[in-house]
Image (cartoon, rainbow, N blue to C red):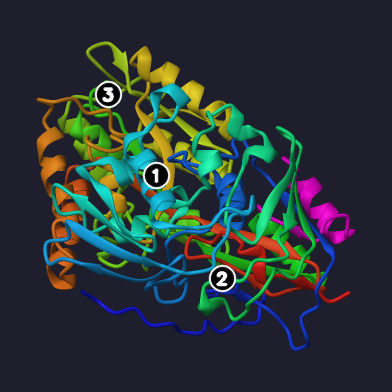
Amino acid sequence: MFAVGIATVALVAACSGNSGDSGTGSPGQPRTGGDLTLAINDSVRSLDPHIATPNFSEALVNQNVYDKLLWQDPKTGDLKPWLATKWETNNDATSFRFWLRPGVTFSDGSELDAQVVKDNLDQLAKGNEELGLAPVPAFATNYGGTTVLAPDELEVTYTQPAASFLNATSFYPGAILGEATLKKSVRDRQVPANLVGSGPFTVKSYAVQGDTVLARRTNYNWAPADVGHSGAAYLDSVTLRQVSDEGVRVGAVRSQQVDVSLGISPTSEKILDAGGLQVIGKPLLGWDIGFYFQVNNAPTNDPSVRKAIVLGWDRDGARKLVTSNYSLSTSVVSKGVPGWVDHSNDLTYDPSAAAKLLDDDGWKPGGDGIRVKDGKRLTVKAIGITNFVVNQPLYEYIQSDLRKIGIQLDLQVLPIADYGAAQTSAKRDGTLNASIAGQGRDDISVIRQTLSPTYSNLLGLKPGDQYYQPLVDVTAKLDSTTDPARRAQYAADAQKYIIDNALVNPVYTTQSVQAANKNVQGITFDSLGRNFLYTTWLSN
C-alpha cells in the first residue's frame, strides 16, 4: 500500500525559453467568461480518447474533455488523486484497488461508479472487435480483469507484475468515458453528441481539418487539487483551429486573430518574444524523437550501418538549429524521466569511427561518394512526421552529415495524416529502414511500450529474430517491481542494451513551444505538456 498526498503546483511566470513545470499566470483575479481560440498544427483525426497513439491535438481534446483515475503532477511526476481519491497495490504489483470520488457526473448526467470504470478498463484491455476498437497495449498485456467490490470501490488484477499500470491510468488513453460512449463504434465516436466524458469541457462541434470547439461544463467541480482552482472552468469555450502553416500561425497570434498558437519554431520564438508576446516551452517527456531502425531490412539489418548512423551526425552543429527550449538526446528516453541514464558518451559525433565501421564491413565509397557493397548502394529510407516544427530541419541536417560519410538518407517527412499509410506501405514492401518518431509518457515503461515485440514493436521484430527475446526480457523487467532501486537498475540495463546494439538513433527531446497574447492567463500543462485549459482565463 502507498499513500498519496496533495500538493499545490506553483504557476511560474512565462518568458522566452522558459521550460517551467506547470504553466504561466500573472497577478490579478481570474475572470470567468470569454472564448479562446488556439491555433494547432495537426488535424484532430479522432475524438476517441481510447486510441493508443493520439497526436498532440487529439491528446489536447482528450485532456480537457475526459478525466482519468489519477493525475500525474507535472512538476514532480508523482501520481495524485483525481477520479480516484486513494488506491492500494500489492507487493508484486499484480493487484490494484481504487476508491472513487463521490459526486462525479458525466456530461449526460450519469454518475461515475465502479461499474463504469470496470467497463472502461475492460474495453481498453480487450478492445471490442464489433465496435472496431483495438486493445490498448499499455492496458492489455497480462490483464487479468476488474472486479467491482462496492459502488465506489474496484480491484484490477494482472497475471504478471504491472508496475506501470498506475501511471497508465493517468495518461491520455486512460480517459474514463461514460457508458453511452463505451457502446459506440469508432465511427460513431466522431459525432460530438456521442461523446460523454466527466471533464471540464464537452465537444460542441467538430470538423475534420477544421475547427473543434469545446464548451464549458457549468457543474464541473472535481479537478486535481494541484491545479489550484475548483469549480467550473473559466473560459466559456475553446476553439481549436487547424493552421498547418507556421508562418500563418505566427501572423495570426501577432494580429490577435488567435489567442494562442502551438508549433512555434526557434526563429519565430525570437520575433514573438521581441514583439511582447508570451513564449512558453514545456518538455514532452517520454521516448525521445529518434530513428527506430527496421533491423530485418537491408541495410539497417547490418549493425555497422546502424552504429555509423548514430556516430555520423554532428550534435553540436544540430544544437544551433534549435533554441534552449529544445535539447538533443542523451539517451533513448528524455532526461527527467525517472530511470534515465546519461549516454552522452555513446551518442557522439565521430565521423572517422563511423567511416572505419563501414570500411571494415565492406562498404566502399562509390564514384559520387555514396558507399557500395555487393553492387548495392548504401541507401537508408526513413519516414518522419512534420508535427513538430524543428523536425524537418533536424532530419535534413542529419541527412547532410550522413552523406559526408557515404550514407544516402532517403528522407520523407510527411503530415501525420499521411505518415501512417506511407510507413505501412514501406514496411509491406520491405523498403523501410527507419521510422522517425517519439512517444510521450513520463514513466520508464515507455521503453517497453515502444520497443517490446509484445507491445508496439516499432522495430518490426518477429519470434526467432536476434533481438526479439532479449528485448522482451529486458523491457519486461521494467514492469516487474515498484521498488525504485531495482527499477532504476532495470531501466539502466534496457537503455544500455538498446544503445549498445544501435537499435535506435536518438535525436532530440520534443517540446510544446507556444505563443500567447498577454491577456491569456493561467496557462497550465499536464505532465506530458498538453494544455489543461481548465485553469486558463482571459484578462479582457
Query: Is residue 211 one of those drawn in magenta?
Result: no
Residue 299 image label:
3
Residue 353 position, x and y percent, is 23, 45
Image: magenta residue range: 241-263
Looking at the image, which residue is at 18% across and 48% down? Answer: 475
Going from N to C along the chain, the mark reached first, 3 or 1, is 1
Residue 445 position, x and y percent, is 27, 54
Mark 1–mark 2 distance (CA, rounded to whole Å): 21 Å
Mark 2 highlights which residue? 222
Query: Is residue 248 one of those drawn in magenta?
Result: yes
Q: Is residue 229 above or below residue 392?
A: below
Amino acid type at mark 3: Pro
Query: Going by the image, does 141 lie left or right of 6?
Result: left
Q: Nearer the viewer, mark 2 or mark 3?
A: 2
Looking at the image, which residue is at 56% across and 70% down? Answer: 222
Crowdedness near tag 3: few (<14), some (14–19) or many (≥20) residues, C-alpha within 10 Å: many
Residue 74 image label:
none
Q: Nearer the viewer, residue 381 or 78?
A: 78
In the rendered image, which quarter is residue 515 located in? bottom right
Residue 90 position, x and y percent, is 16, 66
Going from N to C along the chain, the mark reached first, 1 or 2, is 1
Mark 1 highlights which residue? 119
Q: Quadrant of the N terminus?
A: bottom left
Amino acid type at mark 2: Trp
Marks counted in the figure total 3
Q: Is residue 423 above or below residue 199?
A: above
Query: Going by the image, does 372 lie left or right of 402?
Result: left
Crowdedness near tag 1: few (<14), some (14–19) or many (≥20) residues, C-alpha within 10 Å: some
Q: Do tag 1 and tag 2 residues touch (Cβ < 8 Å)?
A: no
Helix, strand or loop at label 2? It is loop
Residue 396, visible in the rendered structure: no
